[in-house]
Amino acid sequence: MSEVKKFEIILEYIKDLSIETPSAEALRFVRENFTNYNMDIDISSSILQNKALEIITRLTLQDKTDNSEKAFFEIKYATIITLDKSIKDKQTVSKIVLCDLQKIIYPKLEKIFLDIIKNAGYPGLKFEKKVDFEKLYNDKFN
């Protein structure tokens, strides 16, 4: 017996993008102190008129210390999905939005974000830690 396909991705796009480097001095300082930067992930969803879901995955990379020379990086990536009609309960929808979908789109989103940041003047940047959406979901809901 085959598993029901829980959702289908209809559309993916960059909804909003912000790269802020206020000066050449800030660029130099940030390059030298990039270890101070932390990435936050925020996921939100809304129901569209056609009963599809729009999921916004927002990645924000910023220095949360008191340094005066800072840069700011943020991308909001929209994914439009439809759910299988058999899915009714909120917990299943939550797992799809926060975990299953993210495991599919995140590698592409991370590459897009890194490429944009590198092209904005930060060529040596890498994200060392990989995001484990399954663990994040389980820690939050189990």
Image (tube, rainbow, N blue to C red):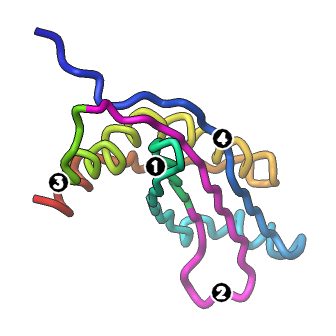
Q: Which mark is residue 128?
A: 1
The stretch drawn in magenta includes residue 40: no
Q: Evaluate if marks 3 and 4 touch, with contact meaning CB atoms under 8 Å apart.
A: no
The rendered magenta stretch, by its main secondary structure, is classed as: strand
* Residue at the far right in the pictured view: 24
* Residue at the far front in the pictured view: 49
Tell me the residue that label 4 is attached to: 13
Which of pointers 4 and 2 indicates the residue nearer the eye? 4
Type of amino acid at the residue the image marks with label 1: Glu
Type of amino acid at the residue the image marks with label 3: Asn
| Callout count | 4
- Look at the image and give the residue range highlighted in magenta: 60-85
Quadrant assignment, res 3: top left
- N-term mark: 1 or 2: 2
Q: Evaluate if marks 2 and 3 touch, with contact meaning CB atoms under 8 Å apart.
A: no
- N-term mark: 4 or 2: 4
What residue sits 75% from the left and 73% below the top? 29
Cα distance between the residues tagged 4 and 1: 25 Å
Label 3 secondary element: helix
Q: Evaluate if marks 1 and 2 touch, with contact meaning CB atoms under 8 Å apart.
A: no
Q: Which mark is residue 138?
A: 3
Type of amino acid at the residue the image marks with label 2: Asn
Front position in the image: 83 or 131: 83
Which of pointers 3 and 1 indicates the residue nearer the eye? 3
Cα distance between the residues tagged 3 and 1: 22 Å
Q: Is residue 87 above or below residue 74?
A: above
Label 4 secondary element: strand
- N-term mark: 3 or 1: 1
